[in-house]
Image (cartoon, grey):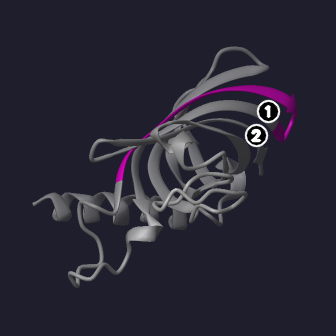
């Protein structure tokens, strides 16, 4: 039953994103970088994140939509055999698919929240023959605060958390959002 709802969520979110790519008014691209926190800081030093978003205006100050992208945990860390060094850890790659919301606080500031599921790209095609199971991702949660630098450019500070079976991959990111 879990797989049924998960697939429905993934396909529904992808439909929302792909059906609105050609209507570019609410289309955004976000790129960010930041240090790791929580359990992931034992193995990784920093994260790189890129997202594609499409937001619809519910009112003058509230926007909702969908987002999908890639989140990569990189950097100096320890492998399972305790060998260390720069880029010694195998990168942890996630593909977050989420519902997005943004609320304008003023003409220059807004807050947001993305909630969804992050697929762990390192876990696809496991030996049990399944493509996706409970071990290939976790709950995705990202609150953010942003400042409008220019008409089509924002500076954003966000916290990203992915919870998977007792392990939390998290980071604080600083990035830019491009609006089209």
Q: Residue 145 in magenta?
A: yes
Q: Which residue is mark 2?
A: 175
* Residue furthest front as drawn: 82
Is residue 73 rendered to the left or right of residue 176?
left
Q: Residues within 10 Å of mark 1 (few under 14, many from 20)?
A: some
Q: Residue 56 in magenta?
A: no
Q: Secondary structure at mark 2?
A: strand
Chain-order first, disc 2 or disc 1: 1
Q: Residue at x 53, y 67 (%)?
A: 18
Is residue 155 rendered to the left or right of residue 23?
right
- Highlighted magenta segment, given as a residue range: 138-153
Q: Which residue is mark 1?
A: 155
Q: Height in image: 81 above or below 59?
A: below
- Figure quadrant of residue 132: bottom left
Q: Are marks 2 and 1 in contact (CB under 8 Å)?
A: yes
Q: Residue at x 46, y 68 (%)?
A: 121
Q: Quadrant of the N terminus?
A: bottom left
Residue 137 position, x and y percent, is 36, 57
Residue 75 position, x and y percent, is 68, 53
Q: Which mark is residue 46?
A: none
Main SS of residues in magenta: strand
């Amino acid at each position: 039953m879990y797989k049924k709802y998960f697939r429905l969520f993934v396909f529904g979110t992808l439909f929302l994103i792909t059906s609105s790519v050609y209507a570019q008014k609410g289309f955004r691209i976000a790129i960010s970088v930041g240090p790791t926190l929580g359990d992931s800081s034992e193995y990784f030093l920093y994260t790189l994140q890129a997202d594609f978003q499409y937001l619809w205006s519910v009112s003058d100050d509230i926007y909702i939509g969908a987002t999908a992208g890639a989140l990569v945990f990189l950097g100096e860390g320890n492998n399972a055999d305790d060998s260390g060094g720069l880029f010694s850890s195998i990168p942890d790659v996630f593909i977050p698919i989420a519902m997005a919301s943004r609320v304008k606080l003023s003409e220059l500031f807004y807050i947001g929240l993305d909630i969804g599921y992050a697929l762990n790209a390192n876990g696809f095609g496991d030996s049990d023959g399944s493509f996706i199971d409970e071990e290939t991702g976790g709950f995705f949660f990202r609150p953010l605060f942003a400042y409008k630098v220019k008409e089509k450019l924002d500076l954003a500070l966000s916290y990203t958390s992915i919870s998977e079976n007792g392990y939390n991959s998290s980071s604080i990111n600083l990035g830019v959002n491009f609006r089209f």
